[in-house]
Image: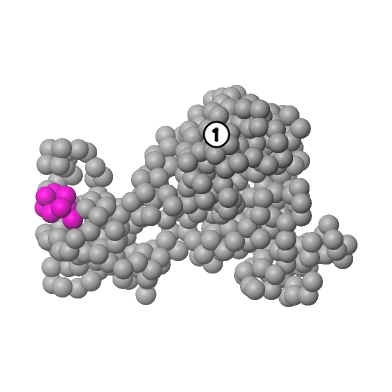
């Protein structure tokens, strides 16, 4: 298939290829075909143990790890006797409900060998897009990472009908990476990266080690998935790449069937890296600044304005007025008492609660509202100042 030749010379590829060791927060996506034995419906424990060894090594050198996994339906259907080639939607949901338990148990056991706690998170793409649900999921994931756990994320297949029919965990993984500002997304696949054409059909297809920019020509190389290969094939992986790199997160597609697949990436085995311009925090702030419509205004005093410019979060004590009606997670303008717009952010409180706690110290919030919410009115990570986006 014709198309431009992204970095193809070995020297150029080596010079620009990212290093997994440089990542701060890594998302690893695992497909059903890698994790579940097709003949028995059982988890491939030897393979999973070797992957867990790799991820424990990342953790040991201070890197944060999140897993996005498939496999619940494949595991659960065998235990329910659903062995036919095609099963109905409600049967898939039932299979997911029982398979999720066994899948979580397998992850818990393998990481317990390294003294690492795992936590199951069930999401749908809507949980990563609707702002209030996005904030809730993000806070849970951030808290788990802060406590040293490895979150294991899966689609909530037992209730999310559309995701079973049309969804895929490649894109879910990219959305999770976007949501928690990960800097590296690893898609473990049944192929070692992107080729100029389908290598199963075209013996002249060339492997592409680095994709600096996603172009229509690059996306055209995806082709269609072959029967028996992972759901969605390369098309969904490139869709995930577009989400990830747009969020400032680099992505790599690597062969996952081999033992210790993460170590293989670090050893220089063939894979395809998709580069991101800028980091995830900068991308998130650009999104907040330019892609959301403000629902209200928080007016801050001079002390709060100085604190924001110094890189701090907005605390309730610095808010002198609340304008408009908004819900938790909605975008609002942050404005100085003199009327100058300082930036935009995602409010941790709705307008009613914001009115009640404005001007108060954070340790008074529980007494005023009857519950303990966030200490910040807007967390620094959810705030884009005007000077940061110019």
Is 107 in front, or is 64? Answer: 107
Q: Residue 149 in the image: state x and y as whole percent.
A: 48, 34
Q: Which residue is mark 1?
A: 94
Whether residue 261 is situated above or below residue 203 in the rendered picture? above
Q: Residue at x 13, y 72 (%)?
A: 338
Where in the figure is residue 370, as x and y percent of width and height?
15, 37
Residue 200 on image: x %, y %: 83, 57
Residue 294 versus residue 40: which sits nearer the camera?
A: 40
SS for dot 1:
helix
- Residue 369 in the magenta stretch? The answer is no
At 70% from the left and 33% from the top, the residue drawn is 83
Extent of the magenta region: 351-359
Position of the N terminus, as image quadrant, is bottom right
Q: Main secondary structure of the magenta part?
A: helix
Measured from the top left, where is residue 52 in percent x and y?
A: 63, 33
Could you tell me if residue 235 is visible in this image?
yes
| Residue drawn at the location 50% of the way across and 29% of the way down | 117
Quarter occupied by residue 199: bottom right
């Amino acid at each position: 298939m014709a198309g431009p030749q992204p970095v193809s010379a070995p020297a150029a590829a080596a010079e620009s290829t990212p290093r997994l060791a440089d990542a701060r927060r890594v998302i690893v996506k695992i497909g059903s075909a890698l994790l579940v034995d097709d003949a028995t419906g059982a988890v491939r424990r030897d393979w999973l143990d070797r992957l867990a060894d790799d991820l424990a090594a990342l953790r040991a050198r201070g890197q944060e790890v999140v897993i996005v996994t498939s496999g619940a339906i494949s595991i659960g259907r065998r235990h329910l006797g659903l062995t036919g080639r095609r099963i109905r939607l409600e049967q898939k949901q039932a299979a997911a409900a029982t398979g999720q338990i066994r899948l979580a148990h397998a992850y818990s056991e393998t990481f317990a060998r390294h003294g690492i706690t795992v936590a199951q998170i069930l999401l749908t793409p809507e949980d990563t897009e609707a702002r209030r649900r996005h904030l809730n999921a993000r806070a849970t994931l951030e808290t788990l990472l802060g406590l040293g756990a490895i979150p294991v994320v899966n689609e909530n297949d037992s209730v999310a009908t559309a995701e079973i029919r049309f969804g895929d965990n490649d894109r879910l993984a990219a959305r999770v990476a976007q949501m928690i500002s990960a800097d590296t997304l690893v898609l473990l696949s049944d192929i070692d990266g992107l080729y100029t054409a389908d290598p199963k059909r075209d013996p002249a297809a060339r492997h592409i080690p680095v994709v600096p920019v996603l172009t229509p020509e690059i996306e055209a190389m995806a082709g269609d998935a072959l029967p028996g290969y992972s759901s969605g094939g390369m098309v969904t992986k490139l869709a995930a790449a577009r989400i990830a790199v747009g969020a400032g997160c680099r992505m790599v597609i690597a062969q996952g069937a081999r033992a210790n697949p993460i170590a293989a990436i670090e050893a220089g085995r063939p894979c395809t890296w998709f580069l991101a311009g800028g980091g995830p925090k900068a991308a998130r702030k650009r999104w907040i600044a330019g892609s959301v419509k403000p629902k209200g205004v928080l007016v801050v005093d001079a002390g709060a304005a100085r604190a924001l410019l110094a890189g701090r979060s907005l605390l309730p004590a610095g808010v002198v007025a609340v304008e408009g009606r908004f819900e938790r997670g909605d975008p609002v303008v942050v404005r100085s008492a003199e009327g100058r717009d300082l930036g935009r952010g995602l409010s941790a409180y709705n307008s009613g609660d914001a009115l009640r706690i404005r001007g108060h110290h954070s340790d008074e919030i529980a007494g005023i509202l009857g519950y303990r919410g966030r200490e910040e009115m807007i967390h620094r990570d959810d705030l884009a100042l005007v000077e940061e986006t110019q």
